[in-house]
Image: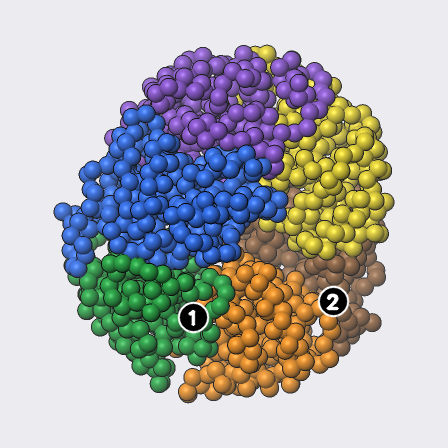
Chain colours: A orange, B brown, C yellow, D purple, E blue, F green
Amino acid sequence: MRLLVLNPNTSPSVTERLAAVATRAASPGTEIVAVTAPRGFPYLSSRAEAQIGGAIALEMLAEKGGDYDGAVIAAFGDPGLHAARDVVEVPVVGMSEAGMLAACLLGRRFSLVTFAPALASWYEDCVALHGLTGRCASIRHLDEAFRSIGEVQEEKAEQLVALACRTVEQDRPDVIVLAGAPLAGLAPLVADRIPVPLVDPIAASIRQLEMLVAMTPRLPEAGRHLRPAAKPNSGLPPALSRIMAGR
Amino acid sequence: MRLLVLNPNTSPSVTERLAAVATRAASPGTEIVAVTAPRGFPYLSSRAEAQIGGAIALEMLAEKGGDYDGAVIAAFGDPGLHAARDVVEVPVVGMSEAGMLAACLLGRRFSLVTFAPALASWYEDCVALHGLTGRCASIRHLDEAFRSIGEVQEEKAEQLVALACRTVEQDRPDVIVLAGAPLAGLAPLVADRIPVPLVDPIAASIRQLEMLVAMTPRLPEAGRHLRPAAKPNSGLPPALSRIMAGR
Amino acid sequence: MRLLVLNPNTSPSVTERLAAVATRAASPGTEIVAVTAPRGFPYLSSRAEAQIGGAIALEMLAEKGGDYDGAVIAAFGDPGLHAARDVVEVPVVGMSEAGMLAACLLGRRFSLVTFAPALASWYEDCVALHGLTGRCASIRHLDEAFRSIGEVQEEKAEQLVALACRTVEQDRPDVIVLAGAPLAGLAPLVADRIPVPLVDPIAASIRQLEMLVAMTPRLPEAGRHLRPAAKPNSGLPPALSRIMAGR
Amino acid sequence: MRLLVLNPNTSPSVTERLAAVATRAASPGTEIVAVTAPRGFPYLSSRAEAQIGGAIALEMLAEKGGDYDGAVIAAFGDPGLHAARDVVEVPVVGMSEAGMLAACLLGRRFSLVTFAPALASWYEDCVALHGLTGRCASIRHLDEAFRSIGEVQEEKAEQLVALACRTVEQDRPDVIVLAGAPLAGLAPLVADRIPVPLVDPIAASIRQLEMLVAMTPRLPEAGRHLRPAAKPNSGLPPALSRIMAGR
Amino acid sequence: MRLLVLNPNTSPSVTERLAAVATRAASPGTEIVAVTAPRGFPYLSSRAEAQIGGAIALEMLAEKGGDYDGAVIAAFGDPGLHAARDVVEVPVVGMSEAGMLAACLLGRRFSLVTFAPALASWYEDCVALHGLTGRCASIRHLDEAFRSIGEVQEEKAEQLVALACRTVEQDRPDVIVLAGAPLAGLAPLVADRIPVPLVDPIAASIRQLEMLVAMTPRLPEAGRHLRPAAKPNSGLPPALSRIMAGR
Amino acid sequence: MRLLVLNPNTSPSVTERLAAVATRAASPGTEIVAVTAPRGFPYLSSRAEAQIGGAIALEMLAEKGGDYDGAVIAAFGDPGLHAARDVVEVPVVGMSEAGMLAACLLGRRFSLVTFAPALASWYEDCVALHGLTGRCASIRHLDEAFRSIGEVQEEKAEQLVALACRTVEQDRPDVIVLAGAPLAGLAPLVADRIPVPLVDPIAASIRQLEMLVAMTPRLPEAGRHLRPAAKPNSGLPPALSRIMAGR
């Protein structure tokens, strides 16, 4: 099976990390194709950026239409996820949704640990969107600026470990999710220094997406993700316009 | 004060209705400026369309920057609302948020009554987004197709009244919100045929927006709508690019 | 339109403050009539006092029957509010309900900041009564006694600002509501010293009440605030007895 | 021990029933004293009547001060209950609270079955007030008028049994609470005709009140029912005025 | 009436304490029979132990079948409680359920205070199982090891008082429940040193069980605790096998 | 990797089905080992049976200790799941937990469809235990008896399809979970006759368990599934006794 790892941002260094972790996590026989947004932001850290980034994710999915068996939207916060499920014909998972559901298998409450303050309030919305507020012990973030989105993982590894340990002590989660695409691959490197299980959301995404593709869930004819009726539109990028117009 | 009524869709006939109702609802001294989306969809009826429409709403707000004291995003479902609050410096309200909060002043539980089936599942997300699930008795919709978005109100008035009455009997709301921008102005015409109070969300939006503008709430330096740090970006429409880059 | 600002307490100095703030907040064409309770307590700070004060508010509304287009029950905690809606034929809003709903337009979570410890537990019930527990970040109060209910605002302004700032830092609300009728008018004076928007609940009440009166919601023939059947009664003050007996 | 069964209404026939059922339910050594409201309504069926009736209950408790070891407020809906706990020095239970908590011992979800439509919306508030919404399967009522509050139990027994059976079938509660003081004593007479356990709330109140009195819980010096500071007041009935003024 | 106090653990010293407190709490005419588990653990402190201990409780109830009018499962955490209600024909209450419901009569929020860290996470599940999460302010425990389960009460009394006082100050409960069978009888000894009411769950259990037995609730023919159909089984202890097979 | 599919019941025909479906669902390189309970019930349909069956599941896990990389407790209702996580050193998933979390990836609300009425109330507890009540649209069951647990799938396929379709129409779930181990493997056979995606919980369990094993989550040193301290015990089956005593 062929899975699309879609980075809705413009940082190729992050896409490379995502591709490497996804490839390592995939089962034999799964091919990973990673793509970087052709426009937009280097990374997303507000609802405003997520509104725009989510629309760009839709464009990217439309561009690649027919070319993959499933897709991961690989930005924590899941920009455009529910929108994508309305119009894409194969399974789509979000990195935060998949990471948090994996955490639910390991304990009653998880905490999200991330690297930038701006993210906390947006991630909080994301937890609520997935109906998981009751299982989220806390959302914690580092406070200092970072130098480069592509290397924030190496730059901040020590501080993230210290923050995760403090979070376990103060908020009592059973599991920690390392939140943020730039942190992909960090979990196994630091797991032995944190007293509860760690989840790498991109690894979790790939395995859960494989599960969905293997289940070949039918296109719904009822329920929430019933395809919307085709609708004329104007001024949209061509591939997106076609998919929204049902052509 | 000068209030922007922003129709994130491309149907000028709906904008005209919105402008008329908004003008009627406004206090003396309030000027209403209504604008229609330059691109996009004739109306929104799915999360996918809302993802795109919300990004277009952001573009429109950026284009008009500095030219208004407050704005209403005038599509039920509030596309782009929280994104807008992250970057716009004046108060912004959403039509569904304002309509539902007004309903809360009139009873414990409201029902939404709308004209198209596709809307129910998206509106359900919208209710949850505003934390009002516990106050929403039901979301009800007509099942048959309509002829024209600009005249759906006249075409379906009888069926909407009948549906509202059935909703009161079966779901026991205390208030009905007529949901959907194309229904603006219908409430006072049919109020005497429905046994509970009706809310017209666009009228409610204008009054609540006036309240916020009069309070002149300060730009937050903390909390959820703290402005995100300026960020380089590429490939966005010029005004939007500027606002996101903090220029 | 003529709006009643009903102080269910016996402190005329508080009524005067309320009247001044309400008049400033009202739109052109709105007349404010403020009344003070003829008996009861100088201010309310327990459920026991609210039970009695709410019954006195009903008496006052009955006394003034027919003489106003809408009423605000102007004690934070909304004593008698739902009772009033059962029997009064024009819109009635509660000061805390209106203040908290206005706060909902400005952020996901608000904190209440007030001046006396006894109030916190009663206000907590009030938040729950309005179904807003999920949107309330905290209820904070000063701990020291105050000298005079009529001047507590001036006496405690500095401490309230300090407390509001601490609340923002520790509880992370997006908005602060200055809770308590004696604090009416304080918000604009201190807004520039607190890093999130402030809500003055009495100003919010007037604007929202104007909205309801303008909507002329019909008397419900179904739902929660259906008038109760007239019922004989004995030993009640005359105006209240008449209204309860449906005379 | 000496327990006060306080009927906040003016119907002595209901008080007699309550006294009989309470006496039958009491343990050896418990004395029941039943009192009828000196003014107010023959029965309560709205929030407005409950606001007034609750204040009358406070007056009655103040009048009888020192003369009982515990009290039951014997109107379903618990008018004045939390207010009473703020000022009365012995345990006070509410008939609906006690009935619903007893039902919680018998199953996950209870339904309330009552005799008059006006009651449902008020009882719904009462369930929420006690934080038991998640355990309430439904609130069901008869629709037809009744002849006399003192004999509604005999008049409507057949219809109540039929309604309870329909409720079990349609709403799937595990337990039925017969709601309303005038139904006191009905449960054992009809229990064998209803497929789930029945709770008589007044019997449950007496037993739970005995438990509280036996525990001799101390007067709180912290928490929700900390006595409010004494406060001057004016125009209140003498005993109530004294208790509120801390004299 | 004859009530079984069932200690699902193997410590006779704890059973003796339970029997003494239960006897003191019982009304005249109630006989208390206390039994100790013939196998299992000296006390329970994990979900794994509770799974096994709950099955042993079922065996014990089956062994004693027909010999009692009601039973208390006397381990905090209520191991086997809902299972017991499925198959035992007389009322069964759980010590934590009864203690927490009694606490609900004394305030809005209770805290559990216990003597060992391992208990907190299991008790948290127990609170959720009973749908009382919204009324639980906190679960607090001592951190140091104890010498003997039979005398932990005497050994730790001072630390428990100090912890309860800290809990009142920091978590603001209205009531404290002393959680854990080995603490039975401690509440009245220390009540005057803690500023909110204390609940002894075993005393509360006896009184509530007496209430249920006096109500003689019928065996349900519908709802949650409908007897399961008899089912063949193999390898179970004889009495348990018989009751499960409906013999 | 080697995964244990643990049937806590005594029906080998069900184990065979489970093994076949699990083997089909597993990735290349995963070995499935299926085991049948040596004692207990042919299937579980009440909380009482689950209490016993869960303890038997613990015994079986202890017996096989060290011989597998992960385990599925393969009875819908997850008997013994949280207990197992307290003491087993490799990942353990429950069939209902895994099925419901997979459904969460496909829509907002799922319904459970099962074959026997007794199951509904137990499954409802299971949904609550996993904190997923807000995502469960309904639990529906067939009403008629079945002939054989091993062939209930073939016998009732038509009725289950009809019930699933009625459920979609009336309760509006986005996904259906076919609940009950004896239904393993039915989903792909009937998927094209039901208008929303179907989840086979055993297939979902295997894939999610593979994910957890691949993540090699560390043994927690904090949080909910911290190993309990070793504890002496008596009268338990030898392997279980050893594991509980930490030997």
Question: In the rendered structure, which amino acid carries the disc numbered 1?
Answer: Leu
- How far is the residue under mark 1 from the one under mark 2? 38 Å
Residue E135 percent coordinates (x, y) = 51, 44
Residue placed most toward the observer, A104 or D231: D231
**E186 with respect to D189 (left or right):** right
* Label 1: which secondary element: loop
Residue depicted at 66% across the width and 39% down the height: C120
In the image, residue F115 sits, relative to residue F87, either above or below, namely above
* The quadrant where residue C226 appears: top right
Q: Give the residue drawn at x 47%, y 87%.
A: A31
Identify the residue shown where x is 62% and y is 71%.
A162
Toward the viewer: C118 or A125?
C118
x and y percentages locating residue A153 in the rendered image: 64, 79
Q: What quarter of the picture does the N terminus of chain D occupy? A: top left
- Where is mark 1, residue-wise? A219
Mark 2: which amino acid? Answer: Pro
- Asked if residue C77 lies left or right of residue E129, the reply is right
Q: Return the residue nearer the eye: F23 or D213.
A: D213
Vertical arrangement, residue F98 with respect to residue F33, above or below: above
Q: Residues within 10 Å of mark 2 (few under 14, many from 20)?
A: some
Say left or right for F210 vs E86.
right
Which mark is drawn over residue B228?
2
Q: Position of residue F172 (x, y in %)?
A: 42, 56
Residue D149 image position (x, y, % from top left):
43, 17
Chain ID of residue with mark 2: B
Q: Nearer the viewer, residue E168 or E245?
A: E168
Q: Is residue C178 above or below residue D56?
A: below
Residue at position x 53%, y 39% in the image:
E175
Numbered label attached to residue A31? none
